Amino acid sequence: MPLISESSFAAIDFESAGAARGRTDVPVQIAIAHWSPTESFGRDFVSFLHAGQSITWSAQKVHGITPDDLEDAPTLLSLWPEVKGLLLGRILVAHGHGTEKRFLRAFPGHPFGPWIDTLLLARAAWPDLAEHSLGALCERFGLVASIDERLPGRRFHDALYDSVASLFLLEHLLRELDFSGKSLDLLLRPDLSAWSRLRP
């Protein structure tokens, strides 16, 4: 198993049209951000996506994406070459990765992974916190100002903001627990009992 310090990470986030009775939810925005312990932050990619259906009012209230934003947007499938190039060979990162895994099923048999879920990592590292949402964690650990500086004009529930925020959170966790020189397996299989002994 490689060391964390030798690994390259790609955080991915989707925003969606929202669930509604009788229809399957679809993505309306994708973002991917690169980071590694040795080179810090790298390339960012973000795109609106053609949805083929209306955005629910509740979803629009959360992420602020409107039908006008999606006008002439590409389909997720049409972005396959770029998405593949950005994700292949990297450790994938997401905060609550269920949505990201589900939407990537649009690419059958894709070779992406392994996955790191920063939600699970945060619960392992800081089990006593009342809330483990991405926004709450970034606020608690003073990461928001740095994220805002990197992405001026964006906010939580923008796909690029959330993907970059998950990398800031991962970086913070590695620094706090002194994990950078340890095995990647610690992140792939977080053990609550073992991690509790490692917390400062």
Image: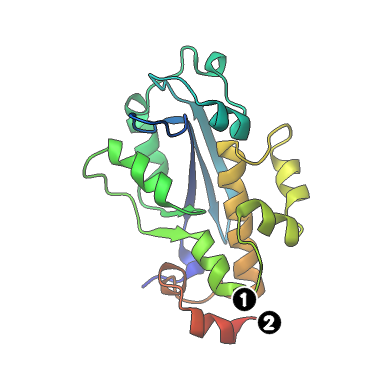
Does residue 169 sit above or below 162 in this rendering? below
Query: Mark 2 belongs to which amino acid?
Result: Pro
SS under mark 2: loop
Placement of the C terminus among the 4 image quadrants: bottom right
Q: Are marks 1 and 2 in contact (CB under 8 Å)?
A: yes
Whether residue 40 can be seen here: no
Q: CA separation, marks 1 and 2?
A: 7 Å
Q: Earlier in the sequence, mark 1 or mark 2?
A: 1
What coloring was used for the rendering? rainbow
Does residue 97 sit above or below 78 in this rendering? below
- Tell me the tag on residue 177: 1
- Tell me the tag on residue 113: none
Does residue 51 sit above or below 100 in this rendering? above
Query: Mark 1 belongs to which amino acid?
Result: Leu
> Which residue is at a point 61% across and 55% down the rendered structure image?
133
SS under mark 1: helix
**What is the x, y in percent for residue 93?**
47, 54
> Which residue is at a point 55% across and 69% down the rendered structure image?
123
Tell whether 179 sits left or right of 136: left
- Tell me the tag on residue 200: 2
Tell whether 27 sits left or right of 39: left
Find residue 183 and report its image quarter.
bottom left
Tell whether 146 sits left or right of 79: right
10 Å crowding of disc 1: few (<14), some (14-19), many (20+): few
> Which residue is at a point 47% across and 49% down the rendered structure image?
10
10 Å crowding of disc 2: few (<14), some (14-19), many (20+): few
> Which residue is at a point 60% across and 39% down the rendered structure image?
157
Q: Residue furthest left?
A: 109
Could you say which is closer to the camera, residue 178 or residue 115? 115
